[in-house]
Amino acid sequence: NRNFLHEGMGFFFCLDLVGRVAPEALLINQHVGPAFRFSGRQRDAMLDTLRERTRLLQELLPWDDPNFGIDEGWARFYPYATEVRPGESVRLSLRLQNHSPKEQTFAVKPRLPAGWTLTAVDPALIGIPPREERAVELAFAVPANAPAGIRLVTADISWDDWDLREWTEAMVTVVSD
C-alpha cells in the first residue's frame, strides 16, 4: 500500500472521492465486518488528522517531502526478483518516484556482483517532474562461469545534497542447467 501524503493522492484522494461521488454510499472493507459510511464530520476529522500527520512527518524527516520517508517503494527495481543462466544478460527497470514539490535530477549508479558487466544505463541522469515517476533501464551481462545462487544488484541514488548508497536492491538468481 503506497498511500502518499499529498493532497489529491492516497488517503486524501479516497476521502475526497467518497465525499464527492458517494457521500451516502455504504463502504465495504474486507477487514471490517459490516458495511459502513462516513459522515461529513468523520471525513473532515480524518482529513485534519492526515494534514497534521503530514506536518509532523515534515518536521521529523530530513527530505523536502515526507513521502520520501514513508514510501519505501519510491526507488525500486522491477522486477524485484529474476532468474538468469550463466552467460546471459538481464534487463531491470529502476523506478523512481519524485515526491519533491519541484523537479529533481536523479543520478543512478548500479552496483553489480564482482565479474558482472554493466551494458546499459538509460539514462544515468534523469530529470523527474514533481510528484511523478520515471524509470531508468539497466542491462548487464552475467559471466559464463557465474556460480548458481542468489545475488543482489543494488543502486546508489543521488540528487541535490543526497547521496544514498545501495539504496534499493533486486535479487538475481543464477540457475544452472
Image (spheres, rainbow, N blue to C red):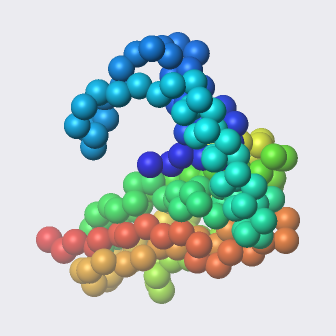
Q: Is residue 125 left or right of residue 15?
A: right
Dividing the image into 4 quarters, which one contains the C terminus?
bottom left
Q: Is residue 25 left or right of residue 33?
A: right
Q: Is residue 92 above or below residue 28?
A: below
Q: Is residue 156 above or below residue 7?
A: below
Residue 71 in the image: state x and y as whole percent. Answer: 57, 57
- In the foreground, 155 or 52: 52
Residue 55 in the image: state x and y as whole percent. Answer: 75, 55
Residue 30 in the image: state x and y as whole percent. Answer: 26, 38
- In the foreground, 95 or 39: 39
Q: Is residue 127 above or below residue 120?
A: above
Identify which residue is drawn at 70% across, 51% down.
52
Identify which residue is drawn at 59% across, 60% down.
70
Q: Is residue 50 above or below residue 173?
A: above
Identify which residue is drawn at 30% across, 65% down.
84
- In the foreground, 110 or 31: 31
Residue 77 in the image: state x and y as whole percent. Answer: 49, 59
Quadrant hosting residue 149: bottom left
The extreme left residue here reads 177
Identify which residue is drawn at 51% across, 25% down.
39
